[in-house]
Structures are given as structure tokens and as C-alpha cells.
Amino acid sequence: MSPTKKQIDALVSELGKADIIIYAMLNAMTLEQKTKVAKQLEASGVSPDGMTRANERRAVLAQFGE
């Protein structure tokens, strides 16, 4: 079953909000905290090429007009 436009819009909206939250948290974190989180994310395989996956997130948001 394919998602509806309303469901897609809700997901894109949430992704946009997550983008704002991630950058706010990064701006509040120390370098030591960022390094610790980056190591944890890399070890888990969630984000091996960049701690915040900003490029991937922005590409999806751009694709859907956010």
C-alpha cells in the first residue's frame, strides 16, 4: 500500500522539524560531546559518513519542496 499525500506531507514536515532540532542541539554541544556522539553513531552503523546525515536529510527535503 502506497502512502497518501497527507502521510508524505506529515513525514516531510517531521523531517524538517528534526533538521531544526538537530542543528539547535549541535550548536549547544561541546566538541567533546559531538565527538562522543559521532563515535556512537558510527559504531551503530546509523551514520557512518557524517554524524547528522544533513546531506541526506536536505536532499529529501529539497525533493519534496521543503
Image: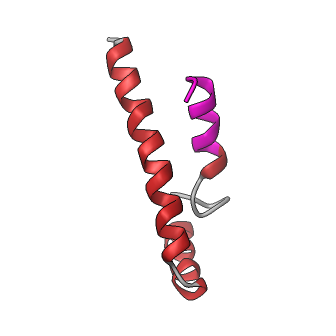
- Residue 45 appearing in the image: no
Q: From the top left corner, tell me how far across and down residue 10 is, in percent.
A: 35, 28
Compared with 3, 62 (above or below) is below
Q: From the top left corner, tell me how far across and down residue 23 is, in percent.
A: 53, 60
Compared with 45, 60 (above or below) is above
Quarter of the image with the N terminus is top left
Question: Left or right of 12: which side holds 54?
Answer: right
Image quarter of residue 65: top right
- Residue 28 appearing in the image: yes
Which residue lies at the image location 48% right of the left edge and 52% below the top edge?
A: 20
Compared with 35, 26 (above or below) is above
- Outermost residue toward the bottom in this view: 32
Colour scheme in use: secondary structure
Q: How many marks?
A: 0
Which residue lies at the image location 44% right of the left edge and 31% below the top edge?
A: 12
> Main SS type for the magenta part?
helix
Compared with 13, 57 (above or below) is below
Which residue lies at the image location 56% right of the left edge and 33% below the top edge?
A: 61
Q: From the top left corner, tell me how far across and down residue 58 is, in percent.
A: 62, 40
Question: Left or right of 51: which side holds 29?
Answer: left
- Residue segment shown in magenta: 56-66
Q: Let me know if residue 59 is in the magenta part.
A: yes
Q: From the top left corner, tell me how far across and down residue 57 is, in percent.
A: 57, 43
Which residue lies at the image location 56% right of the left edge and 72% below the top edge?
A: 38
Quarter of the image with the C terminus is top right
Question: Left or right of 1: which side holds 50?
Answer: right
Q: Let me know if residue 29 is in the magenta part.
A: no
Q: Nearer the viewer, residue 39 or 11?
A: 11
